[in-house]
Structures are given as C-alpha cells and as structure tokens.
Image: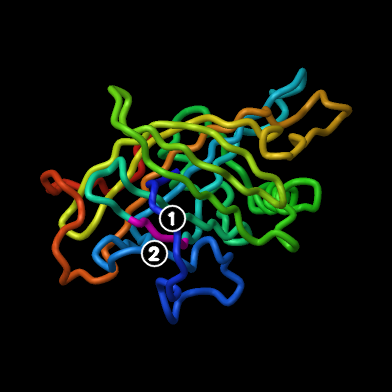
Amino acid sequence: MLIAGCAPVKEAPPISGARTPADLPTECTAAAGNASALHEVDAQRSQIRISVFRDGRLSHLGHNHIVTSGDLYGFVLAGSAFDDTRFALCIPVNALVVDDLSARTEAGSAFSTSLDESQVAATRRNMLSEDQLAGEHYPYVVITGRVGREHPQGHRIAMQLKVRNHHHATDTYADIRSTEGGVVAEGMFQIKLSDLGIQPYSALFGALRVRDELELAYRLSATRRDSSLPKTFAGNPSHHEQEHLTP
C-alpha cells in the first residue's frame, strides 16, 4: 500500500512522539536520511477499505462486508523522485471498523443489505478470532515496501505484508502525487486470504463461506515531519485532494 526506495535504513527516533503506541512495531518507528525526506502518515486523511465477499453454494444466506481502517501509523522516506522512496505502514487490527454504514453506502449495491448490531458484532468477532487475524496476539498488520518506476498504470509498488507471523510479497500500482504538505497515494488491488496464511471463514460445511479473494482500496496521505522544510517531491502540488476514498 504506499511508498519506498533503495537507500539502507538507519535508526532514528519515533516519528510521532506522544501519539505513538507503546506496542507499535519497530518497522513503523524508525526511519533514516535527511529530515526533509521524512513524512508521517496522516491517519485523519488516510483510509484503507477492504471489501469481503460471500461465497459458496448457500452464499445467498450471507452478506458482503466492508472493513475500514480505524487508525494508521507509519512513515514515508522520500527520495528526490517518487521512484526513490520507501515506506512502512502499521494497521492496528483491533481498531478495524466492520460494516460502517456510510462505508457500505459508498461501496455500492453489493453492500446494500442492512445489518443489525448483532450481525456486525458477530462478523467482527470472527475477524479477530484466533484462526483469522488473531488480534489478541498479533495487534498489527505491517506493510513495508518501495516505489519503482512509473508505468501507464501508475507507479509500481513492491511491498511485503506481515499478517500474524506470515509474510507475503506482492506488487501493485498506485497513483502518487505531491501536495503542498507532502504526498498522497491512491490505488486498489486484490489479494487472497490464503496468501496471507489465513483460511477463509466458512460455515455449514463450506456451503457458506468468505471468498478467498479480498479487494483493497486505499487513500494514504503522508505529511512532511517538518512542514517548514522545502518540498521533497518534484512536480506540481495537487489543488483538489479528494474528500472520500475512491477505488
């Protein structure tokens, strides 16, 4: 999901002082290089949206679900161009929001069914259970990576996801642009639960289950740690940042 480069990583102080959780993985608390290259992920202006689809012979008895990020931590270490950049992103598993009404509405007709509080709570319990995300023992999903050259589809992103104690490497493309205060990356990609070391949830002997393939859409905003420093990225800043996540 975001941005990365080629220089070796050196130790540095945590990026966000008072708001940094004590248990935040070290991947998201250390960075390197000139301070003008260091950007902090802005959780208030960022969002990850995960679409989870029903599957199986009795799929009509189930529901599609939307999971959104409740908080995000991390940094972007920028080079002189987008293809000389690295990043780290930590997603608190226990802060993930399941089936927020506005998120379901924005996601379209596939998520138009109404769910009561007990259904949402049951979905969240399943998501955090030991055989799924195991939120009690693995409180963060960690994503690290780097940005490659720009292609017609956007900048190529090589990233590694750490879910529980399982590592999975994958590539995707992102629309990356500079802003007055930093950088924004947007994109969408698909990934399988089984690639993340998770067996999709199932019931009724597999007749009703979660589809193995997830769809992730994201909008990630990172702000220069010292806003008084000159802009790191080349190119013109955006004058119309979108208010909502767009797949």
Left or right: 31 with respect to 128?
left
In front here: 155 or 59? 155
Point out the residue furthest to the front here.
8
Cα–Cα span, label 2 and label 1: 8 Å
- Label 2, secondary structure: give it: loop
Q: Is residue 26 magenta?
A: no
In the image, 39 versus 210, the foreground residue is 39
Q: Is residue 122 above or below residue 11?
A: above
Q: Earlier in the sequence, mark 2 or mark 1?
A: 1
Q: Position of residue 9 (x, y in %)?
A: 45, 59
Q: Amino acid at mark 2?
A: Ala
Residue 44 % position (x, y): 36, 61
- Give the percent coordinates (x, y) of residue 94: 63, 61
Q: Which residue is mark 1?
A: 8
Asked whether the beta carbons under mark 2 and mark 1 sit within 8 Å of each other, the answer is: yes
State the residue at coordinates (54%, 56%): 91
> In the rendered structure, which amino acid carries the disc numbered 1?
Pro
The magenta stretch spans which residues? Answer: 73-77
Mark seen at residue 32: 2
Tell me: 143 left or right of 232: right
The N terminus: image quadrant: top left
Q: Tell me residue 116's x, y (percent).
A: 63, 48
Residue at 34% x, 40% y is: 186
Dominant SS of magenta comes to strand
**Apparent side of residue 95 relative to residue 44 in the rendered image (left or right):** right
Confirm whether residue 118 shows in the render: no
